[in-house]
Amino acid sequence: MRRLPILLRAYFTFCFCVSQLCAQATVAAQNITVQVSPGQIWTDSGIDLQSGDTVEISATVSSDHQADSSGPACDPKGVASAAKTANLPLPSAPAGALIARLHTQGAAPLLVGASSEFHIAEPSHLMLGMNASSARFCQGELAVKVRVTPAGTATTSASNGQETSRSQQLKSQLATAADIFMSGQFGMGKETGTSSSSAAALKISETPLDGQLRKSIDSLPRRVNDQFKNQGDMVNFVIIGSEKDVQAALDAASWHVADTSNENAVLNAVMQTYDKKDYLAMPMSTLYLFGRKQDFGYEMAEPIAMVASRHHFRIWKAPFTWKGSEVWCGAGTHDIGFAKDKRNGSVTHKIDPAVDGERENIGSSLQKANKVKTLSYYLPPNPVQDAKNATGDGYHSDGRLLIIFLQ
């Protein structure tokens, strides 16, 4: 029997490992305490949340403090003596109040106060902070207790005193991945992944691009290439902003940095599943622009289903700036299954040929996360409209680039 390519072997190894864990994993309610300090805007709780989870949060002042000239004492309900400012993370909440942020697409901060309960609609990651525009505006720390009850646990516990197992959730996620794989590969079943076409309508600026910026964009390569110089995906968007701002914006929009190798992917998938987390960093191949590999690769998908279907893109820092800001060139596509690599007969990801949908999805995700200043379309000379990627799959586009100016 011919040896399976590493990508396909990684897929089956991953599914096998998760299946084995399903047979033995049992999830109880999770209880942790997090110390939240005014010394930083957001504190990572280290908690990954799943669809259907219930999160109960309560907070108290963890250290005694007598108000003095150095500032008032921190309070989860808010600092009464603190004046409200226009640039609070959550303007509708009291200044200094305990707030939470869920790393989901476009999610705004939530008021927690002394205690609150939240029901999770989609996979998320919990961050905690104080509603302040600057660090150290109050004294002391908050002791925040977080209890996470997995989906279905409360109902099951009420009926027979037992908690729902992690295996049910993992089996459901694996079924979703299999359904997506069959749909993308053979046109069977129902597509359950997030479609590029579901992106919200973009708010496009009618103001023409600056002449110097247009000239610089005109000089960009139209397509990326693989290590064998085969031309591939089209450059279909440009982001203008510093590296720090780009990373922060993509993080807020729920994009995840991809793993760098398939071997790391399998190991990380197994370890994170064992730790009751969801693996969201499936590796991505190396492609080239400006004669060098991508600076960053990002992806977005449902947990585990990412193996078969994901939104993803690569970005490269351009060799020019605009008005002192860094410029990043991106190539985005939507994986919908697996296909034969026409270069060598191995197996690779299959893309949605309507690549404009992924261009819109990228812009929409950043727009929902309130990280966009303006969006503009630009049709360069000699646009790419019908082509094939490096693996031989065809795609089509209207040829326009989406120009994204970050806040």
Image: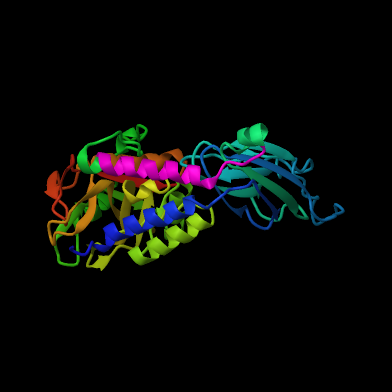
Q: Is residue 69 above or below residue 229?
A: above
**Where does residue 341 sit, x and y in percent of width and height?**
16, 56
How are the residues colored? rainbow
Instruction: Identify the residue at the far right of this view.
Output: 66
Q: Is residue 174 magenta?
A: yes
Q: Can I make out residue 61 in this image?
A: yes
Q: Tell me which corner region of the image, top left, top right, bottom left or bottom right, holds residue 65.
A: bottom right
| Boundaries of the magenta span | 161-183
Q: Can I make out residue 326 in this image?
A: no
Q: Assign the N terminus to one quadrant of the image.
A: bottom left
Q: Is residue 309 magenta?
A: no
Q: Tell me which corner region of the image, top left, top right, bottom left or bottom right, holds residue 14.
A: bottom left
**Direction from residue 282 to residue 75 in the image, left or right:** right
Q: Is residue 255 above or below residue 258?
A: above
**Direction from residue 80 to residue 234 in the image, left or right:** left
Q: Dominant secondary structure of the magenta stretch?
A: helix
**Where does residue 209 sit, x and y in percent of width and height?**
29, 44
Identify the residue at image location x=71%, y=49%: 144
**Where does residue 321 sit, x and y in percent of width and height?**
33, 59
Q: Tell me which corner region of the image, top left, top right, bottom left or bottom right, holds residue 315.
A: bottom left
Q: Is residue 350 above or below residue 364?
A: below
**Where does residue 270 sit, x and y in percent of width and height?**
45, 59
